[in-house]
Image (tube, rainbow, N blue to C red):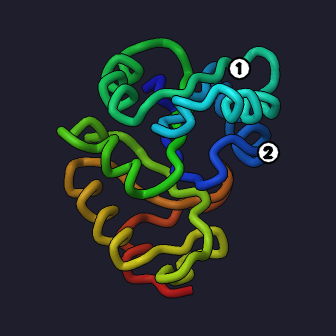
Amino acid sequence: MPLVLLRVDERLIHGQVIVGWAGPLRIGCIVVADDALAESEWEQDLYKLGVPAGIECRFLPVATARDRIAAWQRGSERIALLVRGVPELGRLAEGGSLADQQVNLGGIHHAPGRERVLAYLFLSPEERADLDRVAASGADIGARDLPNAQRVPLAELLTRRD
């Protein structure tokens, strides 16, 4: 499965993604699925500053990324697909495009209406319901901050209060 990482992380491209995930997973391309960033070249340039040479970086609207998931899964390029939040993940999952795809919840931070689930994961009741719907479409959702950390499955996340 060449789509080796699908991660929800509000920070998108940052040190933990580059050092903690891209290196160990031998990522060749980072794709950020974000409608606003896909339209903002100067913001794309800022994010690219943190991407080492040898890793390609693309910014696509969420719908475009969703349309390419099946091809990425069949391809040979090792891709990390990043989205900013649960709403974007829900849009990626439309039409069952994330069936059998592992999803990593890696960095959703405190905000009004969210409760702490893990040190790096805060979810609102709406986000919990959205994650449950994405999982019902066939995605395998869990949380971990780094590849060597123990994965916490969605069933536990939906009931957990840290």
90 in relation to 124, above or below: above
Per the image, label 2 sits on a secondary structure element best described as helix
Q: Quadrant for the C terminus, please.
A: bottom right
Residue 15: assigned label:
2
| Left or right side of 86 for 100 | left
**Image mark for residue 14:** none
Task: Looking at the image, tell me whether mark 1 or mark 2 is earlier in sequence order.
Answer: 2
User: Is the N terminus in the top left, top right, bottom left or bottom right quadrant?
Assistant: top left
Q: Position of residue 114 (x, y in %)?
A: 50, 80
Q: Which residue is found at the position 73% from the left and 35% from the top?
A: 47
The crowding category of the residue bearing disc 1, from other C-alpha atoms within 10 Å (few below 14, some 14 to 19, many at least 20), is: some
- The residue beneath circle 1 is 55
> Along the horizontal axis of the image, is 102 left or right of 40?
left
Residue 53 rendering spot, x and y as whole percentages: 81, 17
Residue 80 quadrant: top right
Circles 1 and 2 in contact, beta carbons < 8 Å = no
**Residue at left 52%, top 30%?**
38
Callout 2 amino acid: Gly
Specify the farthest residue to the bottom. 161
Dot 1: element: loop
Count of all numbered marks drawn on residues in the image: 2
Instruction: Specify few, some or many for label 2: CA neighbours under 10 Å numbering under 14, 14-19, or 20 or more.
Output: few
Residue at horizontal 50 percent and vertical 66 percent from the top: 152
Three-letter residue code for mark 1: Ile
